[in-house]
Amino acid sequence: METILSIRNLSVSYYTDEGEARAIRNLSLDVEKGETLGIVGESGSGKSTLALAIMGLLQPPARVKTGSIYYKGRNILSMQGEEIRKLRGKEIAMIFQDPMTSLNPVKKIRDHFIEYITEHMENIDEHKALEIARKMMKSVGISEERLDDYPHQFSGGMRQRVMIALALALNPNLILADEPTTALDVLVEAQILELVKRLKNEFSLTLILITHNMGVVAEMADRVAVMYCGRIVELSKTEELYKNPKHPYTKGLIESIPLLYNRSRKLVSIPGHPPDLRNIPSGCSFHPRCPYAFDKCMNVEPELEKKEDGRYVACHLY
Ligand SMILES: Nc1ncnc2c1ncn2[C@@H]1O[C@H](COP(=O)(O)OP(=O)(O)OP(=O)(O)O)[C@@H](O)[C@H]1O
Ligand code: SF4
Ligand SMILES: [Mg+2]
């Protein structure tokens, strides 16, 4: 297995008048080439912050406090200007939850393609860029005539297809999809996920799929990283995680699957609320909600450790 992305001891905080929100806390993670890695966790657990950090897109009030993110051996966090711009799009591309926020409403789809492609590729003219655009539209199942349409002329699902086509236009290796289907109805969601699966194989992609939907991860991911309060609390092969969740929080997530299929945004089956990131509980940050918590949990933060069975769990019970 070749490691394509290697995150080491990453800490990211948002600094606001209300204080420091510790969105990512000392997180380490390896992503293997060709895999689909699911990242799950409740709202506010730091998933999008992690994605933005990988893209080198974090903006104030966010600040990287510590750590490195190596992509093919080069640290993204120490890249600047042209170097990071070249990485984005050509090596790593991102698909967001709401395509409308990344598409310009007064620009035709063709112009989005032309701009995106000519900005990132040297020595390419509009004609060649359009050729790529046509090919990509075909790949995602949209007729090329629709390149002349504006974003609002597409349905939500079609718009997400366009975004996927754009993301793949420069032939990147790694795709970060942040809740790509959350805004869509169940039927369209299934179609988009099917498309992503197909394209992943066709283009030999590595995929990081961020979602709060355990059902989606079960269907798509080879491995799953479970985030809680800015940390990974469990990391396992998907099948093992679902059959035999170890971390008490993962157990709660798995039990909530039927609820998630009802498309509830909240994991209501886990009692209590996610902690305030400006005031994270001592010891294991899950302890106020954990049915198994004991003395040590209140004082000592468990590290994410590889166990005998090859699973990674951050819990004093293991
Ligand atoms: N622009 C911001 N300013 C201040 N704090 C922020 C900002 N964005 C995020 N945060 C803080 O970082 C935490 C993590 O946010 P993030 O968006 O990474 O969570 P998430 O797991 O993607 O949640 P969701 O499932 O809702 O998308 C938030 O709970 C919040 O405290
Ligand atoms: S370390 Fe303790 S509080 Fe945290 S998940 Fe494990 S048992 Fe629960
Ligand atoms: Mg998010």
Image (cartoon, rainbow, N blue to C red):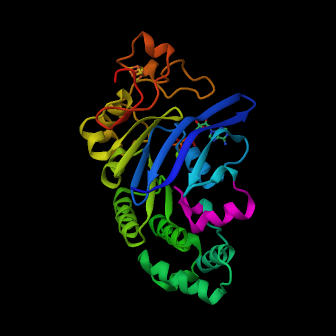
User: Would residue 44 be visible to someone looking at this image?
Assistant: no
159 left or right, relative to 125: left
Query: Whole-percent x and y of residue 236?
Result: 35, 41
In the picture, the quarter occupied by the N terminus is: bottom left
Q: Residue at x 31, y 37 (%)?
A: 254
**Residue placed most toward the observer, 180 or 51:** 51
Quadrant of the rendered structure where residue 98 is? Answer: bottom right
Q: Which residue is drawn at 59% across and 44% down?
A: 49
User: In the rendered view, would you say 262 is above or below 111?
Assistant: above
Quadrant of the rendered structure where residue 112 is? Answer: bottom right
Query: Whole-percent x and y of residue 116?
Result: 64, 73
User: In the rendered view, would you say 183 is above or below 231?
Assistant: below
Quadrant of the rendered structure where residue 115 is? Answer: bottom right
Query: Whole-percent x and y of residue 3?
Result: 46, 54
Magenta includes 91? Answer: yes
Q: In which quarter of the image is ligand 2?
A: top left
240 left or right, relative to 169: left
**Residue placed most toward the observer, 98 or 284:** 284
**Residue placed most toward the observer, 165 or 148:** 165
User: Would residue 98 be visible to someone looking at this image?
Assistant: yes
Query: Whole-percent x and y of residue 161?
Result: 47, 69
User: In the rendered view, would you say 38 is above or below 152?
Assistant: above
In the picture, the quarter occupied by the C terminus is: top left
Q: Which residue lies furthest to the left in this view?
A: 243
Q: Residue furthest top?
A: 295
Q: Residue furthest bottom?
A: 127
**Residue placed most toward the observer, 105 or 95:** 95
Q: What residue span does the magenta drawing correspond to? A: 79-100
User: In the rendered view, would you say 144 is above or below 300?
Assistant: below
Circle count: 0
